[in-house]
Amino acid sequence: MIELYTAPTPNGYKASIALEEMEIPYRVHTVDLREGDQKKPEFLRICPNGRIPAIVDTEEDDFAVFESGALMIYLAEKSGRFLPTDVRGRSRVIQWLMFQMGGVGPMMGQANVFFRYFPEKIQPAIDRYQAEGRRLFEVLDKRLAESEFLAGDYSIADMANWAWVRTHGWSGINIEGLDNLSRWLGAVASRPGAQRGVKVPVDIAELMDAKRKEDAEAFSKNARSMVLGAQSAEDREKGPG
């Protein structure tokens, strides 16, 4: 049994999508980010970095795995699915997984902070992160013109990138003209495992599309308080000077 510690974020959904696609039994523990559950000692024993998602494998002497990319590789190796065993095939998947970890996730995350959550609109920052997000999407689009999925067959690389790219509207990043990316978004969205995965622990798809204005504003307010709260905590730790 896998114990999944997660919250409704793109990184959190990466873990639940993987578990659903691999058909691995798991139990959900919702980490309330607003209440600071991720900084409590019991969670830090599982994830020293205080970030979701994380898992504990009870079949392996309660072995804990943190960092979403490492977690997905672990689950793929455990299940023997969605990660090739040959050197080249494995490398292709990990390259596109790292592309999400080092590029798509951080750039979209910063776009969210400046476009949605910061109380003051710093337009150069918004423009910079949205433009870089669009550039990364164009890289994906070019790759997807050559292949149905990012590394050939459907893999954890697709799960990871899709969990983020599907929220492009929330980040204010336009995908107009990226026909291959749009095709791929629909292909992954049609998979039952992906559909189930983005409902764990809750489904926030409508908020990400900003279709329900009041709920979207409430979501932004909560996220803003977390962002500013984290800033204040860092300032307190730094102290004067």
Image (cartoon, rainbow, N blue to C red):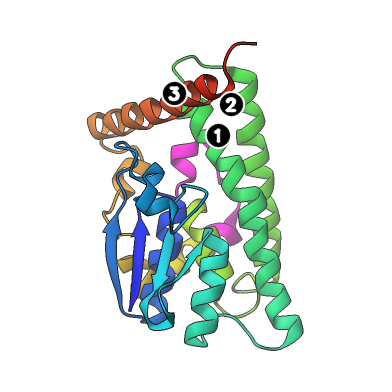
Q: Where, by quadrant of the figure, is residue 39 drawn? A: top left
Image location of residue 38, percent across then percent down: 39, 46
Q: Nearer the viewer, residue 160 or 132?
A: 160
SS category of the residue bearing label 1? helix
Q: Nearer the viewer, mark 2 or mark 3?
A: 3
> How many numbered tags mark residues here?
3
| Label 2 packing within 10 angstroms: few (<14), some (14-19), many (20+) | some
Q: Is residue 62 above or below residue 118?
A: below
Q: Which one is earlier in the sequence, the residue at label 2 or at label 3?
A: 2
* Labels 2 & 3 near each other (Cβ < 8 A): no
Amino acid under disc 1: Ala
Residue at 59% of width from left, 72% of height from top? Answer: 149
The residue that disc 2 covers is 126
User: Residue 111, which numbered label?
Assistant: 1
Residue at 43% of width from left, 56% of height from top? Answer: 45
* Labels 1 & 2 near each other (Cβ < 8 A): yes
